[in-house]
Structure formats: C-alpha cells, structure tokens
Image: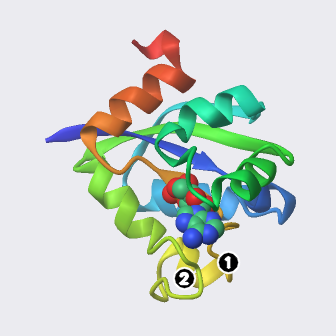
Amino acid sequence: PTQRSFVLIKPDAVRRGLVGAVLSRFEAKGLSVVALSMRQVTEELADEHYAEHLDRPFYPPLRRFITSGPSVALVLEGDEAIEVVRSLNGATDGRKAAPGTIRGDLSLSNRENLVHGSDSPESAAREIALWFPELG
Ligand code: CMP
C-alpha cells in the first residue's frame, strides 16, 4: 500500500553538505517528496519528536546534537514507504550499517547518523502531524 514516512535529514548531514546526496537516494528509489522544510529544531520539538527516548541515557547528547544546527524535514510517499526508507537508511549505528545504505556509506557514528525515518505507521502518523500539521 501507498504510505507516507516522516524523514529528518539531521544537522550532521547539513553541516557536511550531504542534503542533496541523501535526498537523491530517496528520489532515485522512486519515493515522492510530499513536503520539505529546513528547520532549526528547538529543545521543545526535540522532546516531542523523541518522546519515547526522553529517559534514555543517550537522550541528553542526542538532544544537544539534534538542536545543534538546521535540519531538513520531509515527508516521503510511495509503496511501503516506511519500510523502504528504513532499509535505505540502514542500521542506526553507522559503523554497523550495511554498505549501500545511507548510514553505511556515509556515517561512522551511532548518534550522528545523518537521517531519521519513521519506524512504524503509528510513528509516521504522529511525526507527520507534529512536523507538518498542515498535511493533516
Ligand atoms: P533515530 O532514528 O533518529 O532515532 C533515535 C536516535 O537516537 C537515533 O536515530 C540516533 O541518532 C540516536 N541514538 C540511538 N541509539 C543511540 C545510542 N546508543 N547512542 C547514541 N545515540 C543513539
């Protein structure tokens, strides 16, 4: 079925000049860009987006990172978009992600892993409503 996934191209990708390279992979795969916006993530938005991680030990440095500079938020659409985005992104830890994936090819970090993608249809609906309320 056609799905929408929320994707965040993180501050490390913006700083490294990899926005185009990351976006190209999603477009080349055949996913459509439904919405796209450059955002400076605030601490409040970080806490809402990562609500399920607030109590994790890795959250304070994750919040410092995700608010450290602009990100690019997008909504992608296509057949099985949620799983397709996850597979293009690769495993969370760039050091372990398979070559051929965005993280596997371009990241060497568990935190600064370039990109976030929704992990389920429920997360996608929640994240799209949070980041792009106008799409509701
Ligand atoms: P993301 O897909 O955005 O979801 C949660 C984020 O937390 C993850 O990508 C990483 O950026 C970060 N993260 C997850 N696990 C760890 C960890 N063990 N150490 C540091 N950062 C992590």
Q: Amino acid at mark 2?
A: Gly
Q: Are marks 1 and 2 in contact (CB under 8 Å)?
A: no
Please give the name of the residue rendered at 56% of the width and 55% of the height, measured from the top-left corner.
Answer: 56
Q: Which residue is mark 2?
A: 104
As displayed, is residue 33 above or below residue 68?
above
Question: Foreground: 13 or 63?
Answer: 63
Q: Amino acid at mark 1?
A: Ser
Where residue 86 sits: x, y (%)? 38, 61
Q: Is residue 67 left or right of residue 72?
A: right
| Residue 73 occupies quadrant | top right
As displayed, is residue 45 above or below residue 117?
above
Queried on whether the Cβ of the residue with tag 1 lies below 8 angstroms from ligand 1, the answer reads yes
Please give the name of the residue rendered at 20% of the width and 39% of the height, measured from the top-left corner.
Answer: 2
Of tags 1 and 2, the one toward the viewer is 1
Q: In the picture, which quadrant includes the N terminus?
A: top left
Please give the name of the residue rendered at 36% of the width and 68% of the height, measured from the top-left corner.
Answer: 87
* Helix, strand or loop under label 2: helix
- The answer, for residue 113, to whether it is visible in the render is no
Q: Coloring scheme of the render?
A: rainbow
* Helix, strand or loop under label 1: loop
Which residue sits furthest left? 1
Graded by Cα atoms within 10 Å as few (under 14), some (14 to 19) or many (20 or more), the crowding at tag 1 reads some
